[in-house]
Amino acid sequence: MQRNVRMEDISDGKLYTANDLVKADTGNCEGCSACCKGMGKSIVLDPLDIQRLTNHLGKTMEELLNRHVELNVVDGIILPNLKMTGKEEACSFLNQEGRCEIHEARPGICRLFPLGRIYENNTFQYFLQIHECKKSRTKIKVKKWLDTPNLKKYEEYICKWHYFQKDLQNMMEFQPDEMRKKVSMYILQELYLKPYPMEAGFYEEFEERLCKAKKVFLVTVQP
């Protein structure tokens, strides 16, 4: 999801890599669940997020759409996001004690917070969002905070997914509504709804599907 903001207004002015220390550790968020409420449609899910959730919960994406996930247009493409519910507009995976019921399989955006990513030159770096979390925080290595196995592969995947979406968005600016709908339905079916293997084989399977999608839309469909 693209944000039209200035880095100097939202960050500490520094950029980080996975091996850097950053003041992001919230001490297990004891007594606080503010970032799990009122987030609207901003917790957009990528294919690995869905794979983790479906495997962890033993449910299909279609079943998740019945309660926990919804579909919305994000920068011209229909994508899934976590659903907020109730008077507090809380994440549907937040329990009555204000704790995450899927912490082990939580989405990438949740693992990242209060960090963000800035994308440049076909890669990205991390930055600290200084206004997004009111907890007293201590320093921790970025890679430890992300709590993500095979982090190098994950970062490569995030880059490929981000820049693929960016290319799609640029392409669809010149396409009629019928083509935009066709692209969105293909992405949902082939990159989200179609089951993936367990996480160890996810990246290879995703790469094959992504290459196919690029051939279908970014090569054969020109503006």
Image (cartoon, rainbow, N blue to C red):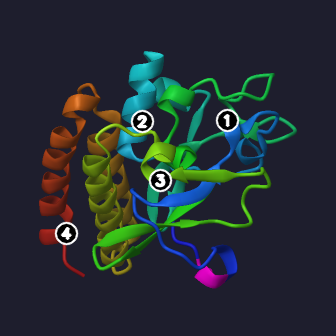
Under mark 4, the amino acid is Leu
**Picture disc at residue 51:** none
Badge 2 or badge 4: first in the primary sequence: 2
- Magenta region includes residue 6: yes
Which one is in front in this view, the residue at disc 3 or the one at disc 4? Answer: 3
Mark 1 → mark 3, Cα distance in angstroms: 15 Å
Circle 4: element type: helix
Q: Viewed as shown, does residue 112 lie left or right of 120? A: right
Circle 2: element type: helix
Point 80% across, 23% down: residue: 97
Under mark 2, the amino acid is Ile
Point 28% across, 64% down: residue: 164
Q: Viewed as shown, does residue 62 lie left or right of 37? A: left
Which one is in front in this view, the residue at disc 2 or the one at disc 3? Answer: 3
Q: Position of residue 213 (x, y in %)?
A: 19, 55
* Label 1 close to label 3 by CB (< 8 Å): no
Mark 1 → mark 4, Cα distance in angstroms: 43 Å
Badge 1 or badge 3: first in the primary sequence: 1
Q: Which residues are magenta?
A: 4-8
Circle 3: element type: helix
Q: Which residue is mark 4?
A: 218
Given residues 131 and 50, the one toward you in this image is 131
Mark 2 → mark 3, Cα distance in angstroms: 23 Å
Instruction: Tell me the chief SS of the magenta region.
Output: loop
**Picture disc at residue 50:** 2
In the image, farthest residue toward the top: 58
Which one is in front in this view, the residue at disc 2 or the one at disc 1? Answer: 1
Q: Position of residue 191 (x, y in %)?
A: 29, 44
Badge 2 or badge 1: first in the primary sequence: 1
Which one is in front in this view, the residue at disc 2 or the one at disc 4? Answer: 2
Under mark 1, the amino acid is Asn
Residue 72, compared with residue 82, is above or below; it is: below
